[in-house]
Amino acid sequence: MRSKRFILLMSVAGLYLSCGGSDISSEEIVSSKQFNPEPNIPLECYTDTGVVRYGFAVANPCYVCHTSANTPYANELDDYQLTLEYAFPEAIKELGNPWLNAVAPELTIGSIPKPSDAEVKKWIRMDNWSEAYSNRGKGQLKYFPDVPPIYAYDASGYRLINVDSEGFIKVGQEYTGWRAFKWKPFPGFFPTNGRIDSTFIRLPAKFRSSGGRLNLETYKRNLAILECAVKGISPGQMCSGTEVGSFVMPERYEGDANDVEVVALQYPPGTEFAHPVYYLDPENIISFKSLRLKEMRYMRKLAYAPVREGSGEEEEEEGEFFWDEGRFFNGSGYWEMSAFIEDEKGRLRPQEPEEAKFCIGCHGGVGGSVDGTFTFWRKVPGREGWIDQDYNLTQASIKDWSYRDVSCEGLTAAKMGKEIGNILRAFCSGSKPGEYQLYFSMTNGGDHFRSNREILSRISKDTNKISFLLSPDENIINEPSLLNYLDTEGYITPDLFLPSESRAYSINKEYFKVVKAQAFIYGRDVFGKAFGVSRGGNSVESLSGVSSTGVAERDIFLVIKTLLSPY
């Protein structure tokens, strides 16, 4: 039944896109709750590398998720092959891009009035976190995490609450075990592209105690051990630059957790993450985050995952799915998850099964994550990283780290195109380009869809010289003096991460319409206009006849294989 109804919707969407109109109203579509057959495959996977628009690839943002595995465990796959083809399940190949809020918002949220500046400012500065926190453990909120709000807003503006100077989350004088940390954002997943968040970590009680009593020094040391473990440092190796100094990695955690083995690239069982997602608020000069939450997400590690062989050759299809009031499991089964999102009135409610499946594809099915996560292994090292994520607004501590040394043998082979030869030689020249530097050049922009025009001048002093594919002789890789997002000490300026005020409120207004329509099943990424290929954007709509991404044909995959091979 779901499939037939969804086919009807996609057929109508196709007619709308090809003929310029539609006989079905957005109210009818939204109220009939059409279904996405594979909500675990995110919108980013529908990016057009250029093969649809131009007939050949001009970008490859896919590599940041689909790459040689960062870990050999069950959560991650050596799946760089997915950068070479649009390997969607048959249901998606038949239907096309199901994220209609991105490619055809007129069909899903078009009838919802756009709020005024005053309305959206009032909305984002209303507190829905406190109510959910107060009602945690009850009814639909029985799985809501026990994390209190960390921001307050009044006539004097925003201020932090319930967070001490070391990032520990407290209620009154009582430590909750939760701790805020700051990380280097995953490439492209910046607030200027619509997503802004915090992340908190908590280890089980025995990691926080010694002799049965809370011991913050023991907890700090165990967090330091974990920080090094998930960054690939094994027992017996030197762990450096932590808040407790340098030390040789132990075989086991310390204090009352001395019975728990340290496993590189994995979190110990019982590790928890809480992940609030906010609206954008330029008035918050601390972090640009709103008082109101869009979502609250939560993960808890269930068990160490065994090593396994294998590689990903097709986008992960939906399997059996357990759901209970917003609680479910990630793709590997080694993490319990729960997720809450706004209802029409703005209260946080459990995400419905199809809404929750949105979380699964990324947290446990791609090579670009570590043990199903994207933040803690990217934590700013040491003491500086134990604050709420501020995007360098209050503390400059995020730099564009460089890639490791690579072998230059054979990189001048004649079979390589000029563009590929030039970029790989740049990596061998000693300049060691940074992670973002490569992403911007590989993507020719600051997001997966090359839709954010505002960010271009923040990336490069010459916006026509970002891509090594389109400007092989002079670009931000071989001419790093073009970079426009580093301060005099090499730290990333907040302007790279954060949008202008007008862009921030525009994104908020479009998302507000999704909330009022309760149209999350059609996507959570909206920017005021459709960005499907037929509308001048770079999101694939129809997948009929689309197979290769063009990345192999232009040898772009050689960059991935050379720079991003496993540890």
Image: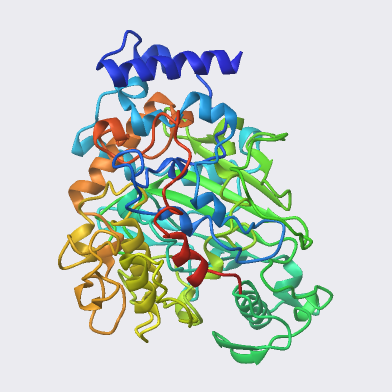
**Residue drawn at x 32%, y 52% as measured from the top left:** 58
**Residue under the point 47% across and 13% down:** 8
Picture colour scheme: rainbow
Q: Is residue 32 visible?
A: no
**Vertical order, 154 against 286 (above or below):** above
Q: Is residue 355 rendered to the left or right of residue 392?
A: right
Q: Quadrant of the N terminus?
A: top right
Residue 218 to residue 47: above or below: below
Quadrant of the rendered image containing residue 416: bottom left
Q: Where, by quadrant of the figure, is residue 480 drawn?
A: bottom left
* Nearest to the observer: residue 173 or residue 342: 342
Q: Residue at x 65, y 91 (%)?
A: 247
Residue sitting at the far left: 462
* Residue occupying the far front of the picture: 414
Work out whether residue 383 or residue 558 is closer to the camera in this orientation and state it.
558
In the image, residue 432 above or below residue 174 = below
Work out whether residue 245 can be spotted. Answer: yes
Classify residue 218 as left or right of residue 64. Answer: right
Q: Residue at x 49, y 29 (%)?
A: 521
Residue 281 place in picture, x, y as percent: 29, 51
Tell me the quarter of the picture where residue 245 sits: bottom right
Tag count in the figure? Answer: 0
Percent of width and height locating residue 354: 58, 31
Could you say where residue 288 lies in the image, as x and y percent from the top left? 31, 57
Place of residue 338 in the rendered image (x, y in percent of width and height, measured from the top left): 62, 44
In the displayed orientation, state which residue is furthest to the right.
259
If the image is split into quadrants, where does the C terminus sit?
A: bottom right
The foreground one among 241 and 541 is: 541
